[in-house]
Amino acid sequence: MTEVWTTQMRRFVLPLVLAIAGLVLFGQGGYIHAKALLAQVLLERAFTETIATGRETKPWSWADTWPVARIEVKRIKASTIVLAGSSGQALAFGPGHVENTPDAGERGVAVYSAHRDTHFRFLQNVAIGDEIDVTRSDGKKFRYRADSTSIVRFDASGIDPLSNGYELVLSTCWPFEALTPGPNRYLLHATLIGPVS
């Protein structure tokens, strides 16, 4: 009787434990994407208010960052709000404007960075020649054209933010399909083609 009971328990308990573990893992993955989507709604609201009032508006009261720009690639219907700074906390909720790089539309190289599996997933679909619009928090809008891409080590990007010219670099981890972090970064390089009225 005990052996029958033990065998029946194994047949029931093991699949139940595996199913629960699978649901937990699935839930964690879903949570990350749900957080990213909800954050973009709150960031969009804060960005709209920032443009309207001219004051930095935090997306939620405890945020340590605020929206500074919107990046759009209309051909592929991609749009995302960019946060001040590129700390891990900021990148958890949206792309970050990399410190010590100019704002879009200013001389030098404006650099924005985000995770490959959420906010910059769309970079794999941007084609050379695509137009990228960047709207700053002051309401000014600038258009760039995607010129090239490169794969570099995180510590050897070769980007000089103070170079002459008006450029934009969008940066994310590489390869896009990887499940673990690695040293390589995918860079999308674009050149300013003018302000947008």
Image (cartoon, grey):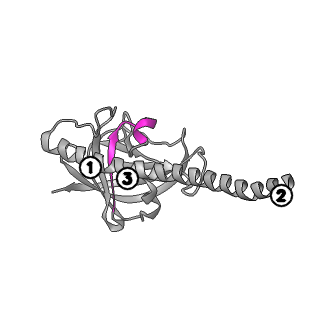
Q: Is residue 15 visible?
A: yes
Mark 1 Cα shell of 10 Å, populated few (<14), some (14-19), many (≥20): some
Q: Magenta segment range?
A: 78-91
Of labels 2 and 1, the one closer to you: 2
Q: Amino acid at mark 1?
A: Glu
Q: Are marks 3 and 2 in contact (CB under 8 Å)?
A: no
Q: Which mark is residue 44?
A: 1
Query: Which element is circle 2 on?
Result: helix
Q: Are marks 1 and 3 in contact (CB under 8 Å)?
A: no
Is 49 colored magenta in this rendering?
no
Asked if 48 appears above or below 15 in the picture, the reply is: above
Query: Which element is circle 1 on?
Result: helix
Instruction: Tally the numbered discs.
Output: 3
Assign the N terminus to one quadrant of the image.
bottom right
Q: Amino acid at mark 2?
A: Val
Provide residue 187's location: percent of width, then percent of height.
47, 51
Q: Amino acid at mark 3?
A: Leu
| Foreground pick, 172 / 145 | 172
Mark sitting earlier along the chain (3/2): 2
| Foreground pick, 191 / 69 | 69
Which residue is found at the position 45% from the left and 52% from the top?
33
- As drawn, the residue found furthest toward the left would be 53
Which residue is found at the position 59% from the left and 43% from the top?
183
Mark sitting earlier along the chain (1/3): 3
Of labels 3 and 2, the one closer to you: 2
Q: Is residue 167 visible?
A: no
Give the side of residue 154 with respect to residue 69, left or right.
right
Which residue is found at the position 35% from the left and 50% from the top?
38
Q: Which mark is residue 4?
A: 2
Give the side of residue 86 with respect to residue 157, left or right.
left
Assign the C terminus to one quadrant of the image.
bottom left
Q: Which mark is residue 37?
A: 3
